[in-house]
Image (tube, rainbow, N blue to C red):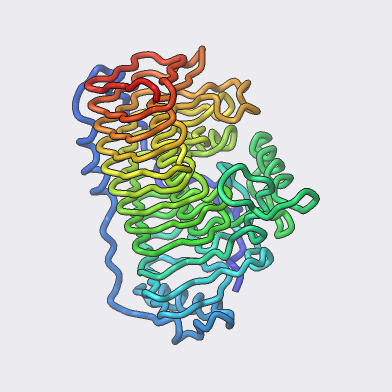
Amino acid sequence: MPPPKIDLASDDGLRVREARAAPRRDRAAAGETEDPWAEVPAILARIPELVFPARDFPATDFGAVGDGRTDAQAGLMRAITTCSQQGGGRVVVPPGDYLTGPLTLASHVNLHLAAGATLRFVADSCRYFPAVLTRWEGVECLATAPFLYARDQHHLALTGEGTIDGGAGPGRWWDWAGPWDGGEPTGWAPGRPDQRPARRRMQAWGEADTPVAERVFAAADLIRPMCVQFHCCHDVLVAGVTLRNLPMWGVHPVRSRAIAVRGVRVISRGPNNDGCVPDSSRDVLIEDCRFDTGDDCVAIKSGRNRDGRRVGLAAEDIVIRGCRMGEGHSGVAIGSEISGDVRRVFIDRCAMNSAPLDQALRIKGNSARGGTVEQIRVRDVEVGRVREAAVRLDLRYDAAEEQGERPPVVRDVRIERLRCAQSGRAVWIEGLPARPVRRVELTDCRFDRVDAPNVLAHVEEFTARGTVFPEPA
């Protein structure tokens, strides 16, 4: 059963139905000294604990067979639809191997994958069409349906100890990326088709303000699907499940609010395999998760360039705590798509360690992306080994766009009690001559071994209290 067709005519320019949160004033700029961490309880209070009716709808009762050969998509969708129509409850996927195409989630439904249950998504691009409204690398378009997709839904969940297996690997999904500079090889070879022409067309549409309803892709364009995407949703829980072998991003809330991601494992080391991507979303908790990815473990975004400014929604009030980051580009990355702004991000009691991990914290943007990143808080983070720098703030990301006319603003970054055993550098900050990075504070941090000295270029008000930087080894 394919995803439902999209009616954009009633969407009034694809505006968010929820009222936009008014930006809060910058307390640091106003000279206030109150503890910004005091805002965290209020953020968490806006993320409700979801309760579902005590009714189970076993997927096998609706024709889903978990033998690894029979197509279970229709049975799974019948269970989800029936559960929603009857007022909600839990759709239970029992132990087994369920071969499926894309699934559309619904309000008041908890899709529960029991221990030993695997949703195994077929690597057939035609199965993921007709296209759905998505945001792909910061640009809105109609493209490949995510594996699990919800739009304009609320009070819904994906839970359990089961697994979502995207079936990706060299030559399956990953080769659509074309050549890739990290992780395992994609399986692409010169002369083979890939998504790069469609990606360039998508970005051109965003820069030209092409109506979203006209930004339509087909299966032949090879736009890789996201794994789990919530678009314009609220009151959402993802808990306990394992995501493996993904074509693209893992858990991707877009224009959404009140999202909890708890105890999730994302183990997928392919191209653009970011683990959790809060995108123009607010009131987000990412807690006790484990990430081993081919790209950033957690990546916070708010739209790319002109299209991100058109949407104009920040990613804000995001709490990341108790997570373990292994392989990846960055433990927590902010950007590079930050055109709609990012503010109030709290990173607490996380552990990061891997030889391939490039940075613990990275903020990245450029003069085409623009956007403001502010009020970033980090405390009690343990870093074993990272390759480039424990902290990197880079406003020259992607040299092809350096000459844009919208330099980003990065200010008010405070890091407390970060411990790093080994890194290429402790701190690597590159602002812009016309737009320096402002107000970066390190308090009681420790760096045991570094290979090269700090880089501080175009930075104002950098302070390090109770922090000693060792001589390079």
Against 95, residue 30 (above or below) is above
In the displayed image of the protein, which residue is found farthest to the front?
473
Residue 67 appears left or right of 22:
right
**Quadrant containing the N terminus in the rendered view:** bottom right
Q: Is residue 243 left or right of residue 222?
A: left
In the rendered image, residue 419, in percent from the top left (x then y), is placed at: 28, 34
Give the mark count. Answer: 0
**Residue 314 seen in render:** no
Q: Quadrant of the C terminus?
A: top left
**Which of 202 and 392 lies nearest the eye of the viewer?**
392
Residue 201 quadrant: top right
- What residue is drawn where x is 55% and y is 76%? 99
Q: Position of residue 338 (x, y in %)?
A: 49, 34
Residue 145 point in image, percent of width and height:
59, 60
- Residue at the image position 27 percent from the left and 66 percent from the top: 51
Relative to 221, does residue 201 appear above or below in the rendering? above
Q: Is residue 259 left or right of residue 135?
A: left
- Picture residue at 35% right of the left edge, 47% below the top: 284
**Residue 306 seen from this side:** yes
Q: Is residue 40 above or below residue 249?
A: above
Which of the pair 318/53 is nearer the observer?
318
Dividing the picture into quadrants, the one containing residue 49 is bottom left
- The residue depicted at 34 percent of the width and 74 percent of the height is 89
The single residue placed furthest to the right in the displayed view is: 191
Give how far across and how far down residue 334 sits, in percent.
44, 36
